[in-house]
Image (spheres, helix red, strand yellow):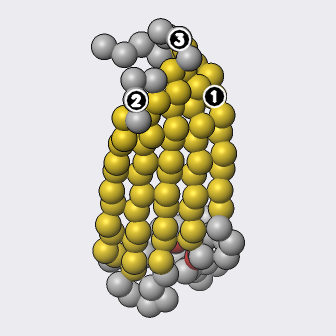
């Protein structure tokens, strides 16, 4: 967690504030999954939920989904979606979509 959200930080020795770091206790649950749909398609996912113990006790949520489709022996297309919710960063749900074409070799 960023210390700036809780204390004023300064590098100026002439001010009374001191730079400090706040520790945080939280409970976190994470999971990963993968489904091989067929020999050409794979769906992978990862997610996590974190709840801070001390007030203000915000929730943090994270979800990532990847859909991989093999086009040819070494070429793949990957569609990736990332969702994140952290109220201390932004009150809205944050998301990012990525479409990539790459060379991948499976052993």
- Give the labeled residue for mark 3: 72
Residue 100 numbered mark, or none:
1
Element at label 2: loop
Image position of 74 with respect to 35: above or below: above
**Residue sitting at 49 percent across and 81 percent down?**
58
**Residue 78 location in percent, x, y?**
57, 31
Mark 3 packing: few (<14 Cα in 10 Å), some, or many (20+)? few
Element at label 3: loop
Image position of 73 with respect to 32: above or below: above
**Residue 44 location in percent, x, y?**
42, 42
**Residue sitting at 33 percent across and 60 percent down?**
30
In this rendering, does residue 104 appear at all?
yes
How far apart marks 3 and 1 lie (CA) works out to 15 Å
How far apart marks 3 and 2 lie (CA) works out to 14 Å
- Give the labeled residue for mark 2: 38
**Residue 40 location in percent, x, y?**
45, 23
Mark 1 packing: few (<14 Cα in 10 Å), some, or many (20+)? few
Image position of 34 with respect to 70: above or below: below
Mark 3 vs 2, N-terminal side: 2
Mark 2 packing: few (<14 Cα in 10 Å), some, or many (20+)? few
- Give the residue at the far front of this rendering: 38
**Residue sitting at 49 percent across and 57 percent down?**
63
How far apart marks 1 and 2 lie (CA) works out to 20 Å
Q: Are marks 1 and 2 in contact (CB under 8 Å)?
A: no
In this rendering, does residue 4 appear at all?
no
Mark 1 vs 2, N-terminal side: 2
């Amino acid at each position: 967690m960023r210390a700036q959200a809780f204390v004023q930080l300064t590098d100026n020795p002439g001010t009374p504030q001191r730079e400090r770091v706040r520790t945080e206790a939280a409970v976190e649950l994470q999971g990963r999954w993968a489904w091989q749909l067929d020999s050409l398609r794979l769906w992978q996912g990862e997610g996590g939920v974190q709840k801070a113990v001390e007030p203000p006790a915000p929730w943090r949520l994270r979800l990532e989904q990847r859909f991989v489709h093999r086009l040819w022996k070494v070429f793949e297309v990957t569609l990736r979606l990332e969702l994140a919710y952290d109220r201390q960063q932004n009150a809205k749900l944050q998301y990012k979509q990525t479409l990539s074409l790459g060379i991948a070799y499976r052993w």
